[in-house]
Amino acid sequence: MKILTGNDLKSGAVVWWTGHGWSLDVNDSADVGDNGAAIIAREEGVQNVFAAYVVDGEKTDEGVRPAHIKERIRAFGPTVRLDLTLKPSDPAALNWVI
């Protein structure tokens, strides 16, 4: 699964491509397949997002999970204190905390 992440142009918040717009929740991510570059060019062109890029991800029972730790931190927050994560009640958080 290939997903897109970037930053919202107005707020700087980490956002994820849903297939028709951007969401703050990684679980809303859509698989872009080989279309990532075209979507990025269009979305950056109309100034909806900046610094967007394609990342590997996987769909699990808990939702969409980016494959690399950098993107998991972008999606869920710090790995050192679960109370500071974006979703402290997420039972899957313990599966990727360092």
Image (cartoon, rainbow, N blue to C red):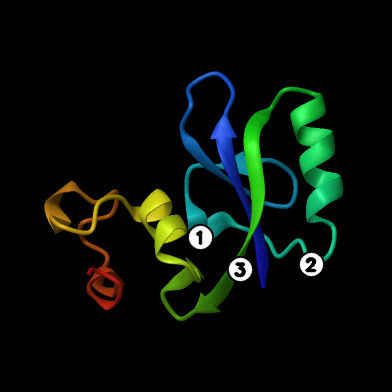
Q: In what element is the residue under mark 2?
A: loop
Instruction: Residue type at mark 2: give it.
Output: Gly
| Separation of marks 2 and 1 at Cα, in angstroms | 17 Å
Q: Is residue 74 above or below residue 72?
A: above
Q: In what element is the residue under mark 1?
A: helix
Q: In what element is the residue under mark 3?
A: strand
What residue does disc 2 label? 33
Left or right for 66, reference 18: left
What residue does disc 3 label? 56
Left or right for 75, reference 35: left
Left or right for 16, reference 11: right
Sooner in the amino-acid sequence: mark 2 or mark 1:
1
Q: Is residue 81 above or below residue 65?
A: above
Task: Report the number of numbered marks.
Answer: 3
Which label belongs to residue 27?
1
Q: Residue furthest top?
A: 10
Q: Quadrant of the N terminus?
A: bottom right
In this orientation, which residue lies closer to the viewer: 14 or 89?
14
